[in-house]
Image (cartoon, grey):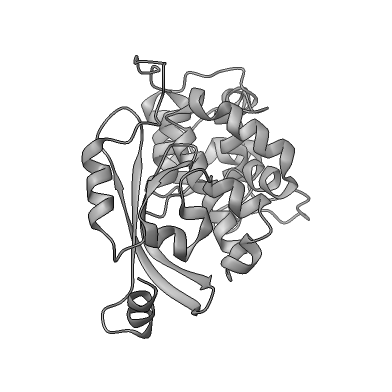
Amino acid sequence: MAGDDNRLGSFLRSRREKIDAASAGVIDNTRRRVKGLRREELALLAGLSPSYYIRLEQGRDRNPSREILEALARVLRLDDTERAYLWSVAMPPLAPAGDDSDPAHAVRPGVLHLLERWRDLPAFVVSPSRDVLAGTTLAARVNPAWSPGHNLIEFAFLDPRARTVYPDREEILLQAVAGLRATAATRRSELDGFVASMRERSETFRALWDSHDVYERVVGEKRLAVDGLGILRLSFETFALAGSEGHVLYVYFPRPGSTDDEALRDLT
């Protein structure tokens, strides 16, 4: 994907380099000159032949069994999201059939009706590539990136306003790329071009993408700098909308009775 045809091998290598050899049970009295586990060490810990694992990481063998994947996930200490990503790159699903006339950009009328009624909440719908397709008026007032016509990834990495809007921008960037990689595992054909474009346009994006971190934050909290209000602290929930489009609904909300709650009511 976007210069990474061997996604399985690249992901395995990136995780291998993050495992501490001593904590994994490797006894080595020599001065180590490699990060993490050596390929041969990982292979032995997983019960594989070193030559087979090397072929797997180099992309010369791309058909590992379920047992092999489970063994590698155990040694690499993958969490649930990383395990799902490992499975998806090792056994990618068939591309879904569908209408190519306007892929993924038509938000259902019922969802639009809900957004119109949620006048007191920042809420918006995004495509797999994080294009904002629809949103509440309040969402655009809280964050310019949360309005239709913007892309969350492009805004965070390329728009100068992001440095002001996101007090914790570095963490936002890490989460954005890790989440995009998780999405790309199942929607590769849709995201190839977007990822390639971002790699060209942003050195920071390229470095984070090449780190192969993968996780999704479906709930959490963000701090945002809002004109006239200062720093607003909002929780969020995400909802995957049924359908082949891959749309996700984000809803942000303050803690009841907090100063953030009062500030958001004033803004409304």
Left or right: 209 in relation to 30: left
Q: Is 248 situated above or below 97?
A: below
* Residue 164: quarter of image: bottom right
The one of 77 and 123 positioned closer to us in this rendering: 123
* Residue 121: quarter of image: bottom left
* Residue 110: quarter of image: top left
Q: Is 186 situated above or below 78?
A: above
Left or right: 198 in relation to 84: right
Q: Is 238 situated above or below 130?
A: below
Query: Residue 147: percent from the left, percent from the top?
Result: 46, 51
Q: Is 64 situated above or below 268?
A: above
Quarter of the image with the N terminus in it: top right
Quarter of the image with the C terminus in it: bottom left
Left or right: 234 in relation to 195: left
The one of 131 and 79 positioned closer to us in this rendering: 131
Query: Residue 20: percent from the left, percent from the top?
Result: 60, 56
Left or right: 118 in relation to 56: left
The residue drawn where x is 51% and y is 72% is 226
